[in-house]
């Protein structure tokens, strides 16, 4: 499934948006295949992995590594991706320092986002000049320290 789609995306010149919301069968292997495609795809602007509960740290790690090379993706949806994990969230935020294509990213409802993550995100935002929208709604672990870091 995702492996074949990933191979197609490597050569596709027209598809601009992919929505995998609630696709609970996509796992790390599928996410890695899609991330590999993002390294070379030059037209995909939006991808949504919201509520992809089977994707874990390895899949999301491949995704943030792809963001180092991809400079066309503008919108990334990771709402309620419980497999994201704090370490991968922090690493993804650090990639935002070099990725100047993403303008909108959503971590809404991600359980891994807390005060420490907000501090890492804040550091990335000091360098990133492209992001215009970050959704952290329903991130229950963000407290006063996280808000202070982002202020």
Image (cartoon, rainbow, N blue to C red):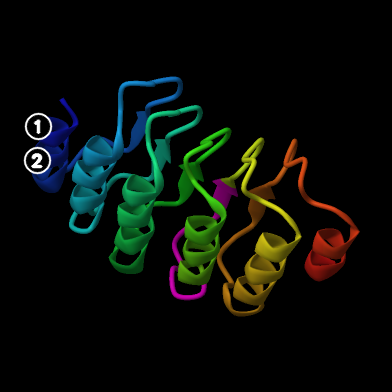
Q: 79 and 40: which one is in front? A: 79
Q: Which mark is residue 27?
A: none
Label 2: which residue? 7
Q: Which residue is depicted at the point 9% across and 32% down?
A: 4
Do residues under tags 2 and 1 come within 8 Å of each other at their CB atoms? yes
Residue 37's spot in the image, x, y percent?
19, 49
- Report helix, strand or loop for mark 2: helix
Q: Is residue 103 above or below residue 119?
A: above
Q: Is residue 120 above or below residue 7?
A: below
| The magenta stretch spans residue 99 | yes
Q: Is residue 39 magenta?
A: no
Residue at label 1?
4
Side (left or right) of 101 relative to 105: left
Residue at point 32%, 46% (across, down): 59
* Residue 18 on image: x %, y %: 34, 31
Residue in the picture at 76% in, 60% down: 115
């Amino acid at each position: 499934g995702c492996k074949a789609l990933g191979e197609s995306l490597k050569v596709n010149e027209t598809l601009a948006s992919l929505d995998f919301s609630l696709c609970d069968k996509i796992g790390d292997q599928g996410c890695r295949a899609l991330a590999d495609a993002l390294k070379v795809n030059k037209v995909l602007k939006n991808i949504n992995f919201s509520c992809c509960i089977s994707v874990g740290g390895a899949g999301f790690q491949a995704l943030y590594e792809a963001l180092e090379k991809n400079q066309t993706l503008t919108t990334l949806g990771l709402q309620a991706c419980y497999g994201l994990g704090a370490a991968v969230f922090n690493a993804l935020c650090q990639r935002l320092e070099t990725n100047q294509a993403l303008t909108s990213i959503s971590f809404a409802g991600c359980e891994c986002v807390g005060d420490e993550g907000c501090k890492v995100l804040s550091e990335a935002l000091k360098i990133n000049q492209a992001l215009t929208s970050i959704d952290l709604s329903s991130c229950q672990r963000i407290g006063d320290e996280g808000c202070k870091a982002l202020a």
